[in-house]
Image: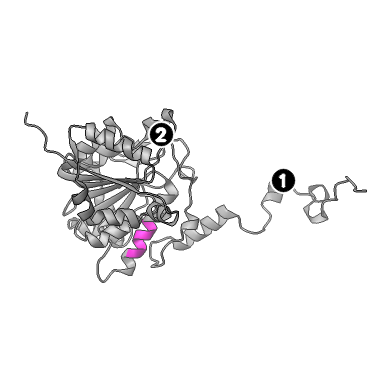
Amino acid sequence: MFSLEAEPCPPHLNLHNQDLSRDEFAAMPGPANKKQKREQYKNARQGGSTTELPKKKFYRQRAHANVFSDHDLVYPISPAYMDWATYYPAYAEPEVADSIESTTSQTQDISLKAVETQDGSDGNGATSSEAIPMKAKDMRKLKQDVEVADIGCGFGGLLVALAPKLPNTLMLGMEIRTQVTEYVHERINALRLQNSKEGLYQNAACLRANSMKFLPNFFKKDQLSKIFLCFPDPHFKARKHKARIVSTTLNSEYAYAVRPGGIVYTITDVEDLHLWMVEHFEKHPSFARVSEEEQEADECVEVMRMETEEGQKVTRNNGQKFVALFRRLEDPPW
């Protein structure tokens, strides 16, 4: 016969045997949980002075974020108000004499002001976005414009692979997830320090942004030469299609930011999404699909296939990758 009586709780775990409140009991020392380990790890990396690459396990976050929520975001009211020098200090114009001391430490560190959240959570909480009013004349200018945008850059695989191949081109990763953005910041900082003599990776940066809402706040007309849309969320359900990164409305924003002759790169392992993107770009009057021959000759395509984290995952799973490139056409005469 089996007894159904519950075994007594060990005395050291029995709240009734101790004069402790539940809060005091919860605060008792014990093995660090995941959140504590994450905080301890990040505190040890503060200052951006370590050459060790960050460990991805401390920056994991759910794969999806609601792009229609008001996240806690920092964004410029227009491209003229964007402080790019914080992200690309090596490409900044010389500073005014009285402000040199305030930014001398930025040569190896990327500001995290755009990835901080009010509550310190994982960044998916719905709070309010905020445009910071600053004077355009106070913005430190860059010697050249950002030309490449990786929208939904994930853990930065494309950025760090392309940066040495296009060393004279400024490229920006845009990611909505807080923890993932912070990981890419740390990754680029470490690579900059590792390659300080060669000056590599100074041309790559990442910021937290909702590109579906605020892309024109960052880029002026005809500024970009390339946009990458790598393995975007397929949003399989029909009612979720409005959240796809390619649509008639968003394609018009891409047409605004990409200069004539520039290229929008797309890749996915979901054929339905691939057909969706092809259909919407081909229907848009500002884009024409690049030929298969020209597509395969583009060095960025191989990087997009093999260097992104999602691309590597698809390769390991023996999946298919669907690629399509679209050239920005000249605007018709008025």
Compare residues 193 and 57 and report the one nearer the observer: 57
Q: Position of residue 285 (x, y in %)?
A: 18, 32
- Amino acid type at circle 1 is Arg
Q: Are marks 2 and 1 in contact (CB under 8 Å)?
A: no
Classify residue 246 by image quadrant.
top left
Compare residues 118 and 152 and report the one nearer the observer: 152
Lower position in the chain sequence, tag 2 or tag 1 = 1
SS for callout 2? loop
Look at the image and give the residue range highlighted in magenta: 185-191
Q: Position of residue 259 (x, y in %)?
A: 15, 42
- Amino acid type at circle 2 is Asp
Q: Which mark is residue 22?
A: 1
Q: Dot 2 corresponds to which residue?
A: 70
Q: Is residue 297 left or right of residue 102?
A: left
Q: Main secondary structure of the magenta part?
A: helix
Compare residues 116 and 219 and report the one nearer the observer: 219
